[in-house]
């Protein structure tokens, strides 16, 4: 097939049919809804599955190790998006990448649903990490393909699409969390069924609704490049397999070693991205200045996500171990707290969008919005100190303290996350626009790689010191960023 223009692809998509948007949005909305349902459903109970005793249906891992693995899992999911984006751009196209990714995710959840051992658990991790890396960035890219260029509906279309993400993230922990008390594996099976429904929706409706969107490979490998890629990939797989076959029996490959390696990669990969883009001859002096302005924003993003992502690790364990789950006269599943983040986003995102629009010229600068995000994130950790101080060390706390913590971090997320996406688009060098977006998502990967090292420090004895230090550090960094905002804005060079 000859290379098609964006207009030809968009023209092949029925442009009316889903709330006044292209019909393809229906397909992508429900595919992503079910993918997020499966992912967030699995994530809501995964840390409990790891550290609950075998007699309770879990794997019986130590709590510090379970928390570190959970953080590394999240880090690898965001890192794998780089591979998924490259394969879609050079090999598959977005449509096949989404399908293959969905299949791998479903198989990963099926592996979790089978009562087994730790080895089967790690196989599921590999499948879900690779599958999410293929599906998540490419289903989002496909949304942009189904609209004609300069279509005024695009922003609203993305808003509808992201509503699907948050609806899936809201419903899944409620359902899977309720099943957790019966069987972890039943909960994982429901997550697998969710991804299966998403795949069926995608396959049945894509031809009619998506037209040619996602069928093109934007920058396909040449015949020589393809041969070289296949050869190098095969060699790498064989070498890795031999190395693991030798090293694992010798005890040279340990979980702790993998956690440390991913932690290092979480810092080195984004650092390498910055250096390559800054030093590239394709980057103009103005773009170099904007990259310098982007560095403090990136650091602030890492600090923010380091707190926000502990909602599924440290705060999940806090919900399980330190919270009165019978406070309202019935048993609350600790997994249900994972629904609070998407619920608050669904409620508050339209209000924030309205607020930024109403402020007009009085809108705070990008760095100052980031600083607000850090301040709210820091406060979300500091409020966790209060129930322990008021009720005594080790006493069970009212669940509303956790609700308040999740609420505060969502306020910070709405100040930082959508603003960060927009800032990444504005500050990216023209030659590296897609890679700069990958860099933005790597801030989350870096945060979770760092978390894998620090979550082990959270113990009942260090609880107040842990929350106070991290929350205080975020607030101090937020104040510094607020004061440095005028200087950073100068580097942006509007």
Image: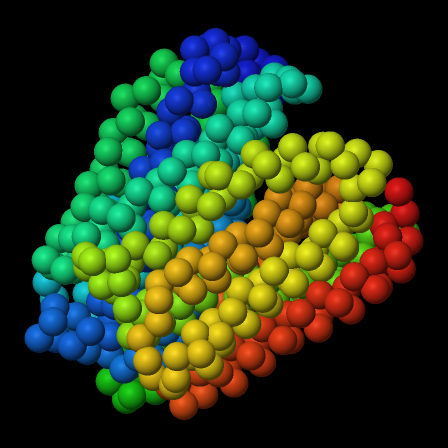
Please state which of residues 14 and 309 is positioned toward the viewer in this rendering: 309
Residue 457's x, y, as percent? 45, 85
Name which residue lies at 53% across and 25% down: 157
Q: Report which quarter residue 119 is drawn in.
A: bottom left
Is residue 276 visible to us here?
no
Residue 479 lies, with reference to residue 156, above or below; the image says below
196 displayed left or right of 93: left
Q: Report which quarter residue 391 is drawn in.
A: bottom left
Residue 406's x, y, as percent? 46, 58
Name which residue lies at 88% across and 57% down: 486
373 displayed left or right of 283: left
Query: How many numbered markers are drawn?
Result: 0
Q: Report which quarter residue 207 is drawn in.
A: top left
Residue 477 lies, with reference to residue 172, above or below; the image says below
Residue 112's x, y, as percent? 19, 58
186 displayed left or right of 211: left
Name which residue lies at 38% across and 86% down: 393
Residue 374's x, y, as percent? 64, 62
Please state which of residues 93 and 11 is positioned toward the viewer in this rendering: 11
Is residue 176 visible to us here?
yes
Residue 174 lies, with reference to residue 476, above or below; the image says above
Coloring basis for residues:
rainbow
Please state which of residues 236 and 456 is positioned toward the viewer in this rendering: 456
In which quadrant is the C terminus drawn? top right
Name which residue lies at 19% across and 78% down: 60
């Amino acid at each position: 097939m000859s290379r098609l223009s964006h207009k030809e692809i968009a023209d092949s998509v029925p442009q009316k049919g889903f709330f006044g948007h292209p019909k393809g949005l229906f397909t992508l909305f429900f595919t992503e809804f079910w993918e997020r349902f499966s992912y967030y459903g699995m994530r809501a109970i995964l840390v409990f599955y790891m550290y609950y005793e075998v007699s309770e249906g879990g794997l019986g891992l130590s709590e510090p190790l379970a928390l570190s693995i959970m953080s590394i899992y999240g880090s690898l999911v965001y890192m794998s998006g780089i591979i998924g984006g490259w394969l879609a751009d050079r090999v598959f196209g977005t449509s096949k990448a989404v399908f293959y990714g969905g299949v791998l995710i479903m198989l990963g959840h099926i592996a979790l649903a089978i009562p087994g051992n730790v080895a089967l658990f790690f196989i599921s991790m590999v499948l879900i990490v690779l599958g999410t890396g293929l599906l998540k960035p490419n289903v989002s890219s496909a949304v942009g393909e189904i609209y004609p260029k300069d279509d005024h509906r695009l922003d609203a279309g993305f808003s509808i699409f992201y509503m699907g993400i948050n609806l899936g993230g809201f419903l899944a922990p409620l359902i899977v969390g309720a099943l957790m008390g019966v069987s972890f594996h039943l909960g994982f099976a429901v997550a697998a069924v969710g991804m299966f429904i998403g795949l069926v929706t995608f396959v049945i409706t894509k031809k009619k609704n998506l037209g040619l969107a996602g069928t093109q490979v934007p920058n396909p490998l040449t015949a020589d490049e393809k041969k070289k890629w296949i050869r190098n990939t095969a060699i790498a797989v064989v070498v890795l397999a031999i190395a693991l076959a030798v090293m694992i029996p010798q005890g040279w490959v340990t979980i702790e070693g993998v956690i440390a390696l991913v932690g290092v990669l979480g810092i080195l990969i984004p650092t390498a991205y910055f250096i390559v883009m800054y030093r590239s001859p394709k980057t103009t002096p103005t773009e170099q200045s904007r990259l310098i302005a982007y560095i403090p924003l990136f650091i602030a993003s890492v600090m923010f996500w380091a707190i926000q992502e502990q909602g599924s690790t440290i705060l999940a364990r806090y919900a399980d171990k330190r919270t009165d789950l019978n406070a309202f006269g019935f048993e609350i599943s600790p997994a249900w707290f994972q629904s609070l983040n998407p619920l608050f986003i669904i409620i508050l995102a339209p209000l924030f969008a309205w607020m930024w629009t109403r402020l007009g010229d009085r809108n705070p600068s990008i760095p100052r919005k980031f600083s607000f995000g850090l301040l709210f994130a820091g406060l979300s950790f500091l409020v966790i100190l209060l129930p322990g101080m008021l009720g005594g060390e080790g006493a069970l706390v009212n669940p509303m303290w956790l609700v308040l913590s999740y609420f505060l971090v969502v306020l910070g997320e709405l100040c930082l996350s959508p603003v960060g996406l927009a800032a990444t688009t504005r500050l990216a060098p023209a030659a590296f626009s897609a890679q700069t977006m990958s860099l933005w998502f790597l801030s989350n990967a870096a945060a979770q790689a760092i978390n894998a090292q620090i979550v082990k420090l959270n113990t009942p004895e260090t609880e107040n010191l842990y929350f106070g230090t991290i929350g205080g550090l975020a607030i101090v960094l937020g104040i510094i960023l607020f004061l440095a905002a005028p200087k950073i804005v100068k580097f942006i060079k509007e």
